[in-house]
Every structure is written in C-alpha cells, then in structure tokens.
C-alpha cells in the first residue's frame, strides 16, 4: 500500500494534528514503511495458536465482594502536605 500526500493530510485531519506542507512527503514515506512492516505480520502462520488474553496462563483469584470501611485513614493521610478533620486540605481554587 502506498500513501500519497492527500492521504497523509486526511489522516492528519482525522487525528486533529497540523502537519506542515514540507513534512508531508517524508511523513508519507515513514507511514509507508510502518504499514509495510505491519503487512509482514500476515505472513506469520498462526493456525496452531489459540486466541489468548495474556501470555501467561494463570487463573484469576476470586475473593468475596465485602464492603469495609478500609480502616486506614491515618495511613492514607500520612503523606498529605495538609490535612483537616481527617480529610486532605487543598487550596481554594474557585473565588
């Protein structure tokens, strides 16, 4: 697949980026190389490979969904620069 300047302009418009006219030719050539590399993946035989979500075959550990209060307010606020009445104190933003 070969990209021309008009296709690069269209891609840039869709991506909402401004590309100067003098960079279009070079960008088209770079994008051609990237697409060529991706097209090489079609040559890989993946018939014996089953679809997977992770490269590691691990089962997720399930735990009961229990509501707790966390009981760690002091640990959370330990690194706060300012705290007030058990909450983070931040400067007023809206006047």
Image: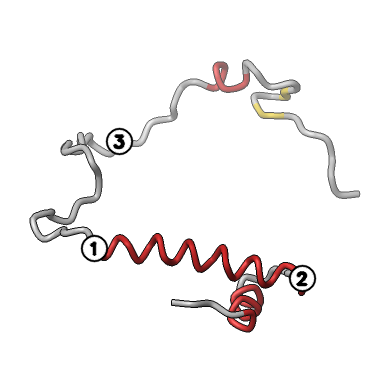
- Which of the two discs, 1 and 3, labels the residue nearer the N terminus? 1
Residue occupied by mark 1: 43
Q: In this view, does 68 lie to the left or right of 83?
A: left
Q: What element carries label 3?
A: loop
> Is 9 in front, or is 78?
9
Q: Which residue occupies 73% across, 69% down?
A: 19
Residue occupied by mark 3: 66
Q: Is residue 48 left or right of residue 76?
A: left
> Is 58 in front, or is 26?
26
Say few, some or many: other residues with alpha carbon within 10 Å of mark 2 (under 14 / 14 to 19 / 20 or more): few
Label number found at residue 22:
2
Image quadrant in which the N terminus is located? bottom left
Q: Which residue occupies 16% across, 58% down?
A: 46
Residue 55, image quadrant: top left
Label number found at residue 89:
none
Position in image of residue 28 (x %, y %) = 59, 71
């Amino acid at each position: 697949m070969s990209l021309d300047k008009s296709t690069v302009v269209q891609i840039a418009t869709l991506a909402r980026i401004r590309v100067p006219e003098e960079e279009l030719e070079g960008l088209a050539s770079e994008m051609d190389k990237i697409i060529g590399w991706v097209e090489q993946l079609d040559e890989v035989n993946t018939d014996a490979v089953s679809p997977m979500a992770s490269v590691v075959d691990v089962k997720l550990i399930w735990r009961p969904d229990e509501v707790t209060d966390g009981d760690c307010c002091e640990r959370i606020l330990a690194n706060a620069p300012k705290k007030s009445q058990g909450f983070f104190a931040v400067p007023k933003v809206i006047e």
